[in-house]
Image (cartoon, rainbow, N blue to C red):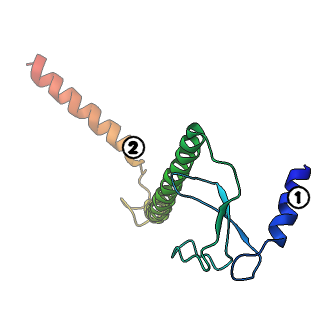
Amino acid sequence: MSRSTSSSSSRSSRMCNCGVPLALVKSWTTDNPGRRFLTCKFYNPSTQYRGCQYFKWYDEDQCQWQKDVINQLLLDKKLLKCESEMLKVENGHLIEQKKIMSEEIEMLNLKLKLGEKQMESPSYGSNEGQVQFPIATMFKVGLVVVVVVVLVKLFGR
């Protein structure tokens, strides 16, 4: 505990060659993943510009298994991020397909209601006073007639 306190206070009191307090930065190279180091505040990790070139490791060196584990975790994180992005795109496509299918269902329901209203209207079918049969009943009767005709032709004379 006292070590981290003294390291923290000595870090804040230490200055680089530019005369500014040191910055504590993490390395994300494959050789030193997550390892912290002290450097000039003008250090830019993206351009590797180091200001006055001050550099000192803050953490102790890692064992090879630690490096391997951290690098594998970083790779897994990248893969999961890519998979997440792919799933977001796929989800967007599925939402669009759902919307299209909902619109199609709505159109089919409207057509069904329109068809039912036409069947219920008095102008549909035969004249007034005659009994009207549902289409399903007429289909069944027609099917029975066809079966009887086929059976008579096959077996009867």
- 56 left or right of 134? right
- Furthest residue toward top: 155
Give how far across and how far down residue 119 sits, in percent. Answer: 43, 59
**Label 2 residue SS:** helix
Q: How many marks?
A: 2
Within 10 Å of disc 2 (Cα), the crowding (few <14, some 14-19, many 20+) is few
Q: Which residue is mark 1?
A: 6
Give how far across and how far down residue 104 sits, in percent. Answer: 43, 63
Mark 1 residue type: Ser
Q: Residue at x 44, y 65 (%)?
A: 100
Q: Residue at x 63, y 54 (%)?
A: 34
Disc 2 to disc 1: CB gap under 8 Å: no
Q: Which residue is mark 2?
A: 136
Q: Residue at x 22, y 27 (%)?
A: 148
Q: Residue at x 54, y 77 (%)?
A: 49
Labels 2 and 1: the sequence-earlier one: 1
- Is 157 in front, or is 18? 18
Give the distance between the C-alpha atoms of the residues marked 2 and 1, in whole angstroms: 91 Å
Quadrant hosting residue 14: bottom right
